[in-house]
Image (cartoon, rainbow, N blue to C red):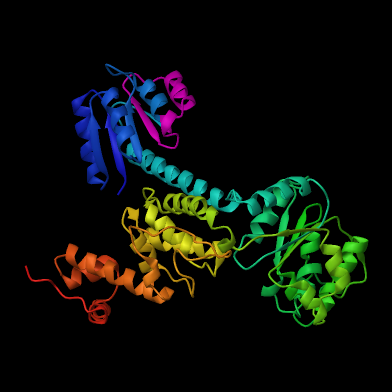
Amino acid sequence: MAKLLIIDDERAIRSTLREILEYENYEVEDVDNGVEGLELIKKKKFDLVLCDIKMNRMDGMEVLEQALAFSPDLPFIMISGHGTVETAIEASKKGAFDFISKPPDLNRLLITVRNALDRGTLVTETKVLKRKASKTRDILGSSVNINKIKETIERVAPTEARVLITGANGSGKELVARWLHEKSNRADSPLIEVNCAAIPSELIESELFGHEKGSFTSAVKQRIGKFELANGGTLFLDEIGDMSLSAQAKVLRALQEHKISRVGGEKELEVNVRVLAATNKDLMKEIEDGNFRMDLYHRLNVINIHVPHLRERIEDIPEIAQNFLEDICRDYGIPVKKISEGGMIALQGLPWTGNVRELHNMIERLIILSDKVITEHDVIAFANPGGGTNIGAAVGNGTPAASPVNGLDYEKFSNFQDYKDHAEREFIKFKLEKNNWNVSKTADDIDIQRSHLYSKIEKFGLKRVAE
């Protein structure tokens, strides 16, 4: 239900507008002066404001200017009994959606309100979509490895050098490629991405180089390939270690001669493309096994950027987690939650087999399932790490990742599962006691089935202490 605010010093006008708008199922508040109206706008979220122009204490135009200064997308409909063309133009210049004269025509008023609300919704949706579509996320972190990557990008991006980006799945290879393009002299031209692992080997050549009509059974029309689409820009070949040998030969020729031929075509086409490639495979081993061409490897590997695994840079986890937390809460339209110190230490202790991608999913899960403050117990309860490293235990280099949390002695846990069981038991016990041992309420509270909760109570030997 849309929430509207009426600011007008005439009680009869306020009452009439309120009655009409509430009849149309809008939620309405009203005040009789601009000062109070401005305070309400600052404190509450309104979808539309109807504001008189001539008022005591504060002029409607002043309310409009000050309100739009801190809420620029809030639609305003200005109302006046002394309406002139000049007034309407001035209101429009200051950012008002529309201008209505007193007494307002009922049909025009309702149509204007509906149009203003629709426009406000479209503006909000457009901003969200633009942010999602066009924003290249920052490379987060200040560890030695990440700082080295940032420095390399700054040096290499403005050149035409080809770059081979290596690293595990989910580590952020695509993000490095995007920043190489963003900071290059080709930034105004397209960045075309191809996931070589996602395209069947028999179709990869058509995908990269295009094909002529009739060149094979399903080629019912001519197709432009990715090399042509990226002409003047950048072509990012992700998971290039999965490319077929025949396609590798054509890519090598394109890199050497800057020319391509469509599948089934005889004409050579010149292309001006900077190629970036990425892989999670050991290409030298692939070369030894006969799966990758040595000459193509050397063509691609002019500059090598290796993106480290998240567990090799746990000192970056707080910054990355906080950034994900803010972005996801903003996209969900909810207040930004907090991660407690213990929760952050618990995050740093997870093995992160899925890398940065897993951390993003984990933060999203915690936002959905946790309260306002994400605690250590939340992290353990909702973690799905997929294996074997103790929280707070050695990560990568054999040194402790964190000191014990809340005085907990980690030495008594022989493996990660023991720690999880302990944390899960304490978490369930805490929730049961908080809900006065109401199993149904507790099951809803922690978002599991009641039968599952009964099984956990039995498994951990939890019993209500007699008072």
> Measured from the top left, where is residue 37 in percent x and y?
28, 28
Instruction: Tell me if residue 400 can be seen.
Output: yes
- Left or right: where 186 falls relative to 265: left
Q: Tell me which residue sits at (65%, 49%) in the image.
A: 147
Please tell me which residue lies in front, 415 or 1: 415
Q: Tell me which residue sits at (51%, 68%) in the image.
A: 351
- Left or right: where 253 falls relative to 98: right
Name, please, the residue furthest toward the top. 56
Name, please, the residue furthest toward the left. 467
How many discs mark residues in the rendered view?
Answer: 0
State the image quarter where residue 217 is shown.
bottom right
Q: Is residue 386 above or below residue 431?
A: below
> Measured from the top left, where is residue 413 in percent x and y?
38, 73
> Measured from the top left, where is residue 154 in percent x and y?
73, 45
Q: What residue range appears in magenta? A: 68-97
- Left or right: where 382 falls relative to 276: left
> Measured from the top left, where is residue 52 in percent x and y?
31, 25
Q: Tell me which residue sits at (23%, 23%) in the image.
A: 9
Q: Is residue 134 above or below residue 258?
A: above
State the image quarter where residue 244 is shown.
bottom right
Please tell me which residue lies in front, 176 or 328: 176
Q: Is residue 317 above or below residue 419?
A: above
Instruction: Tell me if residue 106 can be seen.
Output: no
Instruction: Specify whether residue 201 is painted magenta.
Output: no
Q: Is residue 411 above or below residue 47?
A: below
Instruction: Locate the C terminus and report the quarter of the image it occupies.
Output: bottom left
Instruction: Specify whether residue 81 is painted magenta.
Output: yes
Q: Tell me which residue sits at (40%, 69%) in the image.
A: 411
